[in-house]
Amino acid sequence: MPFSVKLRDFLELNKVDYKHTTHPIAYTAREVASAEHLPAREVAKVVVVSADNAWHMAVVPANRTLDLAELRADMGFHQARLATERELASLFPDCDLGAMPPFGNLYGMPVYADSGLALDDWIAFNAGSHTDVIHMRFTDFRRLVNPVVVPLAKDLEMSRGW
């Protein structure tokens, strides 16, 4: 799929300064960072979670992983689990599987962004495909999406018990 029309129209309607780039197919956020020649901390990856019978979008830097226990504690959820591939396909029919942009507001879900993303001026993220990327200021992302910004991520090594 090409650059998400829903996302492009939303960005243009809101007159946001952004840059659209393309690269060879990259399936993980770390691969996107490499393809875009960016530090992994500047690439936002989306993790969709079912919590307390509702869908939620968590956005974390590519060099970190979502801490589900932290999300549950910070948001007061009783239970939380990752969405399945089948659920993702249903929730984001206009996006390649796993390439959804971090704009939960366009899909009817609240967004939680890891506070580490706010440390850099710019973020980059998949734009609905495994080849299209949007680069934009974090302040613009924050203004358009209105995410809850909290510490949600842990280092990848810690998540593997290293």
Image (cartoon, rainbow, N blue to C red):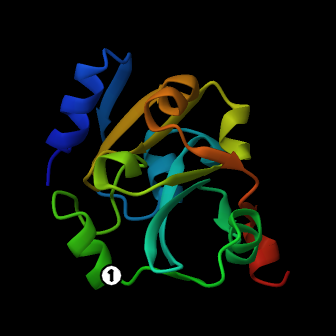
Between 70 and 38, the residue placed more toward the observer is 70
Q: Residue at x 72, y 61 (%)?
A: 153
Image position of 94 with respect to 162: above or below: above
Q: Residue at x 24, y 63 (%)?
A: 92
Q: Residue at x 76, y 54 (%)?
A: 151
Amino acid type assigned to the residue bearing label 1 in the image: Glu
Image position of 81 with respect to 121: above or below: below
Q: Is residue 24 visible?
A: no
Between 90 and 127, the residue placed more toward the observer is 90
Between 101 and 105, the residue placed more toward the observer is 105
Place of residue 81 in the rendered image (x, y in percent of width and height, measured from the top left): 54, 83
Residue at disc 1, secondary structure: helix
Residue denoted by label 1: 85
Task: Quadrant for the C terminus, please.
Answer: bottom right
Q: Is residue 4 visible?
A: yes
Image position of 100 with respect to 48: above or below: above
- Badge 1 crowding class, 10 Å Cα cut-off, few under 14, some 14 to 19, many 20 or more, is few
Task: Quadrant for the N terminus, please.
Answer: bottom left
Q: In the rendered image, which quarter is residue 138 located in?
A: top right
